[in-house]
Image: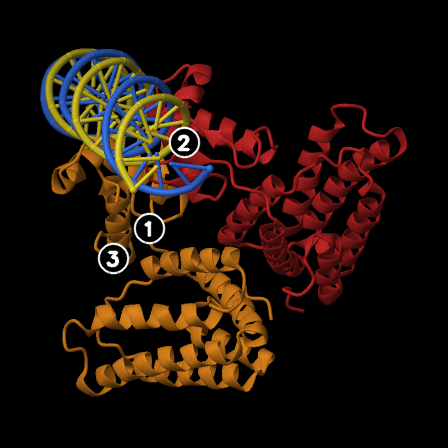
Chain colours: A red, B orange, C yellow, D blue
DNA sequence: ATTTCCAAAAATTTCGAGATTTTGGTATAT
DNA sequence: ATATACCAAAATCTCGAAATTTTTGGAAAT
């Protein structure tokens, strides 16, 4: 694998998991030392990250981590509802038993982790695993939609969403709600009720919407 | 303006207008001469274009113009219907008279050009103007949706759509249909009928869908 | 005739330095 | 005291060349 790609992936991961502070400056020269490469290589990676919205770029003024704003989070949530709803409905129609099996499996895994967090609290390190399982579940929902374009778009929006949604909320007060939400989505999807599925996806994310901007 | 940005924009324009053949290789060294800059600068621009889907990148194997495929075109069309439908409905709700005025103006302009093409055929050079007017109309549709995220996503998908849709079809046989389509969309939007507007947007683009994959 | 292998040629990736621009602090003038 | 001008330090942008990898084309072997 090319070095560039590695650095791109590594930076992306850090940006998604809020390793950098919002609004922080990302100096190519500074990162160069850590990665043991030249500044140009880091620069290229940052440039690419800027085109996917994970980094802001201003000419002659370098790169910054995007600021947090409730408006942006609401817009990203709106897109998630739209794209996940569409992708899931398509998956219901063309996914078949294979998709249902994979979805059930993904939910089982996620559910297991969420219950542990719910009972034990957060035993330091379940956070990362939960993130992965959450993303896996939501990606599986749309995995049989048959559109690579839709999946790519969703993945990009999901990443930006994660970046915006700070998880200083480490006590996971929301987790018990989430357990119900995910189960509702699974049930609706397996029942084949398209409108209900869209509704449940919406409900799951609704707390991040500012209230007015969502259609339907 | 930075040189990089210029080159990025110029290459983007060429890619959208099918200046390069589908599947063609894009050698940084070759383009470097034309732009009178170093290969690294071209490389950066190409790298960024690859993250927005206008160029394919394979490590150690350089950059290529994406191939044409009916599947990809159908997927992109599907996304356009989804995003334009959503954006337009939101614009209907929050756009007000200002939006209606801008939309009417954009349609008037587009309509004028389309009628000229319809009667005179294509007097060599109306193509470029038509492209711009078309994009302007469709962007105006969603312009009052209140979501920068949605607008960016749409713009990106629209560009990829353009890149896929070869316009060797220079006789513009479709133009008379298009005149009706655009008028229908305008009427539906101004009437405030959300479902009808979505339907008209769908009908306008339906000829690029392969048939099965679209929801609703 | 087809396949395999090797070396030359071409293309890609990485680098570090130099040119250009911004940033931050100090002194001067209003 | 505020504003402007100026200068030094730091950061960004561009470049061309060196290092690495793929591609090409022809010779040898099957």
CA distance separating discs 2 and 1: 25 Å
Q: Is residue A4 left or right of residue A148?
A: left
Locate the C terminus of chain B and report the quarter of the image it occupies: bottom right
Q: Which residue is mark 1?
A: B67
- Disc 2 element: helix
Q: In the orientation shown, which residue stands out farthest toward the right? A: A119
Q: Which residue is mark 2?
A: A45
Residue A9: where, in percent of width, then height? 49, 30
CA distance separating discs 2 and 3: 27 Å
Chain letter belonging to callout 2: A
Dot 3 or dot 1, earlier in sequence: 3
Q: Which residue is mark 3?
A: B18
Q: Residue at x 43, y 15 (%)?
A: A33
Residue in front for this viewpoint, B96 or A150: B96
Residue A2 visible at all: no
- Disc 3 element: loop
């Amino acid at each position: 694998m090319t070095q560039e790609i590695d650095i791109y992936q590594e930076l992306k991961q850090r940006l998604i998991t809020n390793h950098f502070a919002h609004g922080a400056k990302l100096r190519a020269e500074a990162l160069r030392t850590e990665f043991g490469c030249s500044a140009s290589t880091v620069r290229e990676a940052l440039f690419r990250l800027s085109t996917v919205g994970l980094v802001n770029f201003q000419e002659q003024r370098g790169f910054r981590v995007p600021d947090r704003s409730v408006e942006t989070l609401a817009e990203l949530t709106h897109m998630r509802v739209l794209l996940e709803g569409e992708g899931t409905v398509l998956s219901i129609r063309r996914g078949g038993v294979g998709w249902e099996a994979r979805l059930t499996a993904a939910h089982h895994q996620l559910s297991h982790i969420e219950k542990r967090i719910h009972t034990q609290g957060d035993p330091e390190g379940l956070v990362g695993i939960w993130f992965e399982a959450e993303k896996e579940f939501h990606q599986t929902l749309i995995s049989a939609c048959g559109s690579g374009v839709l999946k790519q778009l969703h993945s990009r929006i999901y990443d930006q969403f994660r970046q915006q949604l700070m998880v200083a909320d480490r006590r996971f007060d929301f987790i018990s709600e989430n357990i119900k939400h995910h189960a509702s989505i699974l049930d609706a999807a397996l029942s084949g009720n398209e409108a209900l599925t869209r509704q449940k996806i919406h409900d799951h994310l609704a707390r991040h919407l500012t209230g007015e901007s969502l259609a339907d």
